Image: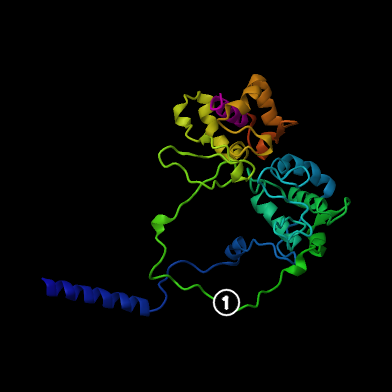
């Protein structure tokens, strides 16, 4: 029996080796020019890949304020720990470099590409070509790279020269690969993944049995009061209405970026003290602010969270979800 089994294995192995050596396996298909074009989506420094369309600084200002300012600030200064877009000149060789579009980015085409593919954060790839050109023009204007009458399009973008372009160069140092570790390697069980609260990594570790972390303020661990923030509040412990239950998906898709972290003055989900005055204004007011946008001393709320593809009903459900979990 065992001899027969060994013989069968040898026969199968020989058969497979014959298939491999016989030539192509016939799997897949030849890539057509259309398929290749579908993957060739990068925007190159010389402007190759930029799409038709145009936009001006004047057109970009209201678009930026509606779709970008809640995270990046009205003047590109950044809200909370969201990226700063403007300023930072002369800081790259300091202990605290500020890498902005104006101080760091080498090519204007990269700015267009990033906005087009990834912004706004809550609704990526929702902008038209004209909106991308307009917002990019306004961000360049915030960095004093273009004048207020600048109109961005494929041709003008190709002509732009960014302030830091010459500081990017080909690194001609030899390629040195790290050696793989086979002996006396670090024990993976000792690795610790430490989460953050309010965007600040705590110096202490989470208490394994409680799910709470040390409270730190303004990035200064020494200012910690020793108090603790509970992060155990679970949506499963709150009886939600049908409307609020339907709003959870909308929240996860379009609202959590701001309301999980509290940027731009957004009240955090579950923070009773942050919501009590807002809830006191009534649901009609809350819904109106969420649908149409709001800007006041206590924060900025972009219309529909910057995701204009949402219906008014979607927004109302998301508001109900947040309110019921924050009372």
Indicate the secondary structure of the residue bearing disc 1.
loop
Q: Where residue 183 appears, x then y in whole percent?
A: 38, 70
Residue at screen point 74% across, 63% down: 107
Residue 236 visible, this orientation: yes
Left or right of 142 in this view: 242:
left
Whether residue 316 is situated above or below residue 121 in the rendered picture: above
Question: Quick one: quadrant of the C terminus?
Answer: top right
Mark 1 surroundings: few (<14), some (14-19) or many (≥20) residues within 10 A: few
Q: Pick the residue in front: 280 or 185.
A: 185
Residue at screen point 68% across, 50% down: 83
Left or right of 99 in this view: 255:
left
Indicate whether residue 88 is drawn in magenta: no
Residue at screen point 12% across, 72% down: 2
Residue 282 visible, this orientation: no
Q: Where residue 265 appears, x then y in whole percent?
A: 68, 35
Q: Where residue 318 appears, x then y in whole percent?
A: 58, 31
Q: Where residue 186 appears, x then y in whole percent?
A: 42, 63
Left or right of 81 in this view: 27:
left
Count of marks placed on residues:
1
Magenta stretch in the rendered image = 313-327
Q: How is the image coloured?
A: rainbow
The image quadrant that residue 12 belongs to is: bottom left
Q: Pick the residue in front: 318 or 43.
A: 318
The image quadrant that residue 101 belongs to is: bottom right
Indicate whether residue 316 is drawn in magenta: yes
The image quadrant that residue 216 belongs to is: top right
For the stretch drawn in magenta, the main secondary structure is helix
Whether residue 209 is situated above or below residue 242 in the rendered picture: below
* Residue that badge 1 annotates: 175
Question: Quick one: quadrant of the N terminus?
Answer: bottom left
Q: Pick the residue in front: 13 or 273.
A: 273
């Amino acid at each position: 029996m065992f001899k027969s089994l060994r013989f069968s294995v040898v026969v199968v192995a020989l058969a497979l080796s014959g298939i491999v050596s016989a030539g192509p396996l016939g799997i897949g298909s030849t890539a057509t020019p259309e398929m290749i074009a579908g993957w060739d989506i990068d925007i190159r420094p010389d402007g190759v890949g930029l799409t038709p369309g145009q936009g001006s600084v004047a057109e970009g200002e209201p678009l930026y304020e509606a779709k970008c300012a809640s995270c990046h600030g009205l003047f590109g200064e950044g809200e909370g720990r969201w990226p700063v877009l403007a300023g930072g000149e002369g800081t790259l060789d300091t202990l605290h470099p500020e890498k902005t579009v104006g101080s760091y980015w080498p090519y204007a085409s990269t700015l267009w590409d990033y906005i087009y593919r990834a912004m706004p954060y809550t609704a990526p790839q929702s902008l038209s070509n004209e909106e991308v050109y307009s917002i990019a023009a306004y961000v360049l204007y915030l960095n004093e790279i273009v004048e207020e009458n600048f109109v961005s399009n494929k041709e003008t973008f190709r002509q732009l020269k960014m302030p830091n372009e010459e500081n990017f160069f080909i690194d001609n140092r030899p390629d040195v690969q790290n050696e793989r570790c086979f002996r006396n390697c670090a024990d993976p069980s000792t690795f610790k993944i430490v989460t953050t609260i309010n965007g600040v990594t705590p110096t202490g570790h989470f208490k394994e049995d409680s799910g709470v972390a040390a409270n730190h303020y303004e990035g200064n661990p020494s200012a910690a009061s020793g108090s603790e923030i509970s992060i155990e509040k679970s949506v499963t412990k709150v009886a939600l209405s049908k409307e609020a239950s339907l709003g959870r998906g909308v929240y996860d898709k379009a609202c959590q970026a701001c309301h999980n972290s509290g940027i731009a003055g957004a009240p955090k989900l579950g923070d009773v003290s942050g919501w009590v005055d807002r809830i006191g204004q009534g649901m009609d007011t809350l819904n109106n602010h969420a649908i149409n946008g709001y800007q006041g001393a206590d924060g900025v709320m972009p219309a529909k969270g910057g995701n204009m593809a949402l219906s008014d009903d979607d927004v109302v459900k998301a508001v109900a979800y947040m309110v019921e979990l924050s009372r």
